[in-house]
Amino acid sequence: MPLTKLHVPSTLPPEICRSIGDLLHTSLVDTCGVNPDDNFCLVARYAADESIIHPTFLGDRDSSSTIVVEITLLAGRSDDQKENFYKDFRERLQKIGFEPNNSIVFLTENNAIDWSFSNAGSVKSVLGL
């Protein structure tokens, strides 16, 4: 049940944003066992003067073209799965012509009680977990 948020420069074309969202979800499915139907992605655009992104922290990047990928998902993935996801995601970015170094990715894990999709309550209660 991931919720992904793509924070992207306002100059990034919508079709590239859609491609990144699609490959992000596919990568999560392939490396982290995410259900293929659990695809929830928000795109937030920012103007060049609305971000402060260090150009060399833990790698070189073009801060004017950098995307920040924020992923919230149910806890339970191993460190190996996460590392495989980071590698796979960046390889997929490269394949669509987006510079992988211009991506910052972070995961936040939580539990089934922390999600609700309807007035039936939390995912935990709906699924009887």
Image: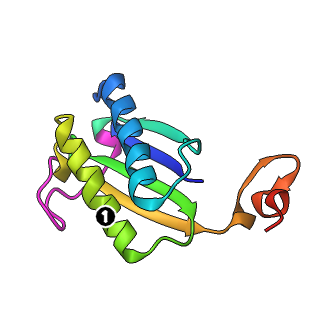
How does the figure colour the protein chain or chains? rainbow
Q: Is residue 101 above or below residue 7?
A: below
Q: Is residue 65 above or below residue 16?
A: below
Residue topped by disc 1: 84
Task: Report x, y in % for residue 85.
Answer: 34, 60
95 left or right of 106 in image: left
Density class for disc 1 (Cα within 10 Å; few <14, some 14-19, many ≥20) is some
| Residue at 35% from the left image edge and 73% from the top image edge | 80
| Residue at 40% from the left image edge and 36% from the top image edge | 22
* Amino acid under disc 1: Asn
Task: Report x, y in % for residue 12.
Answer: 29, 29
Tell me, yes or no, if residue 72 can be seen here.
Answer: yes
Task: Report x, y in % for residue 107.
Answer: 45, 63
Which residue occupies the foreground of this view, 60 or 49?
60
> How many labels were placed on the picture?
1
In the picture, the quarter occupied by the C terminus is bottom right
Tell me, yes or no, if residue 98 can be seen here.
Answer: no
| Residue at 16% from the left image edge and 35% from the top image edge | 97
- Residue at the extreme right: 120
37 left or right of 79 in image: right
- Residue at the extreme bottom: 79
Which residue occupies the foreground of this view, 127 or 18?
127
Q: Quadrant of residue 92?
A: top left
Say whether residue 60 is magenta: yes
Q: Main secondary structure of the magenta part?
A: loop
116 left or right of 73 in image: right
**SS class of the residue under badge 1?**
helix
Which region is colored magenta? Answer: 49-62
Say whether residue 8 is magenta: no
Q: Quadrant of residue 44?
A: top left
| Residue at 31% from the left image edge and 68% from the top image edge | 83
